[in-house]
Image (cartoon, helix red, strand yellow):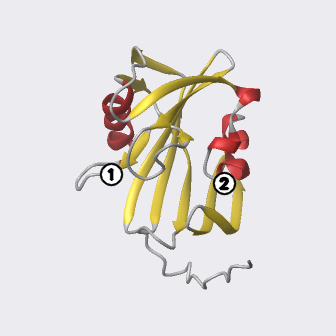
Amino acid sequence: MVMAIREVDWQHWHGEMPATLMFVVQEGKVLLIEKLRGIGKGKVNGPGGKIDPGETPEQCVVRECQEELHITPLDPVKMGELCFAMSDIPDIHCHVFMATRYEGVPTATEEAIPLWTDLDQIPYDRMWEDDRCWLAGMLAGRKFFGRFIFEGETMLWHELDWQAH
């Protein structure tokens, strides 16, 4: 079955759901989570979530890490933005961060189970399809801006811009 790619007016596109993701990297490993509920339940990803009204993306990503894993990332660095035109949930505008230090002990919660993963063993087969496009480059220190069209959990189209820093 071939799915038709819907037209997206990216010039006027606005993600109804502002969100964040965090990737803590230390000693050749990245801290991922197995998501236990909400969007992406059952998938592996970085901790993160919806930005609350009045909250900055940086404030949100720290709060989400505290809620999901009981850690506080220190000195988060914004690495990129992801724009998702989705078929079955509101469109998402996600701000992606990295950190190399944190306080606390990564702890399983009702939201997530922490998974320290070797950088060369990332379980892409358990992640959203778009992660294959940008995650390795970001973990290598490259900043980016990406646009993606999804039909359900299937990526139909993407455009990725690696930015000089």
Q: Does residue 164 appear in this view?
A: no
Q: Give the x, y percent position of residue 89.
A: 43, 67
Image quadrant assignment for residue 148: bottom right
Q: Work out how far the residue at label 1 is from the one at label 2, CA to CA, in angstroms.
A: 23 Å
Is 163 displayed left or right of 59 in the figure? right
Q: Which residue is mark 2?
A: 129
Residue 78 vs residue 159, the one in the foreground:
159
Label 2 crowding class (10 Å Cα cut-off): few <14, some 14-19, many 20+?
some
Amino acid at pointer 2: Glu
Please report the residue visible at 46 percent of the width from the left and 61 percent of the height from the top: 93
Label at residue 79: none
Residue 56 vs residue 37, the one in the foreground:
37
Circle 1: element type: loop
Q: Does residue 6 appear in this view?
A: yes
Up the image or down, 6 lies above or below 76; here it is: below
Image quadrant occupied by the C terminus: top right
Q: Give the x, y percent position of residue 155.
A: 66, 64
Amino acid at pointer 1: Ile
Q: Residue furthest left?
A: 54
Q: Which residue is mark 1?
A: 51
Image quadrant assignment for residue 127: top right
Residue 37 vs residue 32, the one in the foreground:
37
Q: How many marks?
A: 2
Up the image or down, 118 lies above or below 146; here it is: above
